[in-house]
Amino acid sequence: MDQALLNVVLIAKKNTSLSLRSALKSVIDQTYKAIEILVVDANEPNSMYSLGLQEDLADYPKVRYLQMDQSLSIPQIRNYCVNTLEGEFITFLSCNDKWDSLYTPLQMDRLIRDTQGGASCCNGILVDERKMGSSVKSLFGSMTFFSSGWVLTPPAPVQVIYRSCVVKELGGFDEHFEIYCDADMLMRINRHYQ
């Protein structure tokens, strides 16, 4: 059986070569192989960051490269990628992240088997600060499925895989959340599927 395509988008904004190479290696070393990698360069064109990034990517001919306007926010870049990349699943990393190879096959298997799942998340805590009082939802736990559309896995670095059509259905990533894109989207998926 063919594996479902997972788009992995690494977003580079003033990141060093060493951290990019580490993040990229963590994705390439996955046991889940139906992965397409796109590195989005959101640095000033011809800056030392952008030129260094392009030089580093010369060692990875199968990795796609896309230069985007540096004034775009992380949510804007994510929304562009969700709307233009082919494939049922997508995930986002900064160049400072590392992808845990143990969980990707489990996350993908669960999302493929349960077509109602909107996202799969490893570890983390979500805090919704839009309400007057804060609402906290822990993502720790054993492999458990909730009808909310979340698949929770044992403690590990946070990594989220989205079903692209669910992100589109919810109107994409909220552009008011530059840093907490994943937390906001997971809460919206949770509310949508309840």
Image: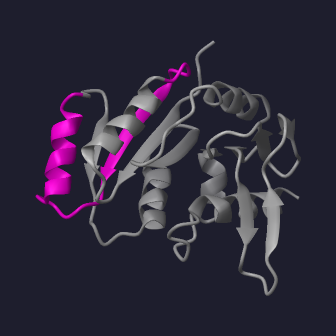
Residue 143 location, quadrant: top right
**Residue displayed at 14% across by 50% down:** 51
Give the x, y percent position of residue 189: 74, 58
Total labels drawn: 0
Whether the magenta-drawn stretch holds residue 150 is answered as no
**Residue displayed at 32% across by 36% down:** 21
The residue closer to the viewer here, 88 or 94, is: 94
Give the x, y percent position of residue 72: 35, 69
The residue closer to the viewer here, 108 or 164, is: 108
Residue 71 location, quadrant: bottom left
Q: Judge from the rendering whether residue 81 lies leftward or rightward of residue 113; answer left or right.
A: left
**Image quadrant in which the N terminus is located:** top right
**Image quadrant in which the C terminus is located:** bottom right
Q: Residue furthest top?
A: 1
How is the structure coloured here? Answer: one colour
Give the x, y percent position of residue 119: 70, 46
**Residue displayed at 88% across by 47% down:** 147
Is the residue 56 above or below the residue 124 in the image? above
Note whether residue 173 is visible.
yes
Note whether residue 86 is visible.
no
**Residue displayed at 73% across by 62% down:** 126
Magenta extent: 30-59
Give the x, y percent position of residue 137: 81, 61
Q: Residue furthest bottom?
A: 132
Q: Judge from the rendering whether residue 100 lies leftward or rightward of residue 12; answer left or right.
A: right
Is the residue 73 above or below the residue 31 in the image? below
Whether the magenta-drawn stretch holds residue 51 is answered as yes
